[in-house]
Image (cartoon, rainbow, N blue to C red):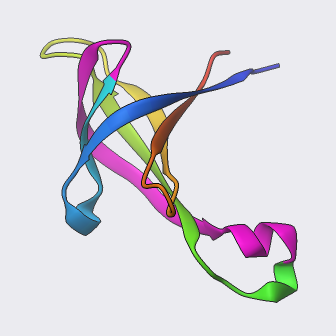
Amino acid sequence: MNKVRSEPVHVQAKGDDGPVRFIRQDRLYTVSAVLEHWAISREWRQDPGAGYGQADEFWRVEAAPGPGMTAAVYELRREPTSGAWSLRRDTG
């Protein structure tokens, strides 16, 4: 069974194009590809009939911690009220 870890990260985003870099554990990761982008309304999660309000944004990206390093897939989440970002990664 895979475990999912979530941790706060600092993200540099480029407007609506999404994350371009993020800092995780004092290392700068560069995003090489945005694989998916979606939004989920908090109200919808609590009551699917309630419609959409402010939505958490999710970005699945491929990123590496430096040139020549192996890229991995990460899921970044932006909380709409605070603008805070967190990272989720399957730890296998």
Q: Is 9 placed left or right of 68 in the picture?
A: right
Which quadrant holds the N terminus? Answer: top right
Give percent across and percent down for residue 57.
50, 60
Snapshot quadrant of residue 88: top right
Choose between 53 and 71: the one closer to the eye.
Answer: 53
The residue drawn where x is 17% and y is 16% is 66
The residue drawn where x is 50% and y is 63% is 80
Give percent across and percent down for residue 82.
47, 55
**Image: 70 above or below 63:** above
Give percent across and percent down for residue 30.
21, 31
**Image: 28 above or below 68:** below
Q: Is residue 32 magenta?
A: yes
Give percent across and percent down for residue 50.
81, 86
Q: Is 10 placed left or right of 60 in the picture?
A: left
Residue at the limit of the structure toward the left, as seen here: 67
**Image: 60 above or below 54:** above
The magenta region covers 24-47
The residue drawn where x is 27% and y is 22% is 64
Q: Is 3 placed left or right of 70 in the picture?
A: right
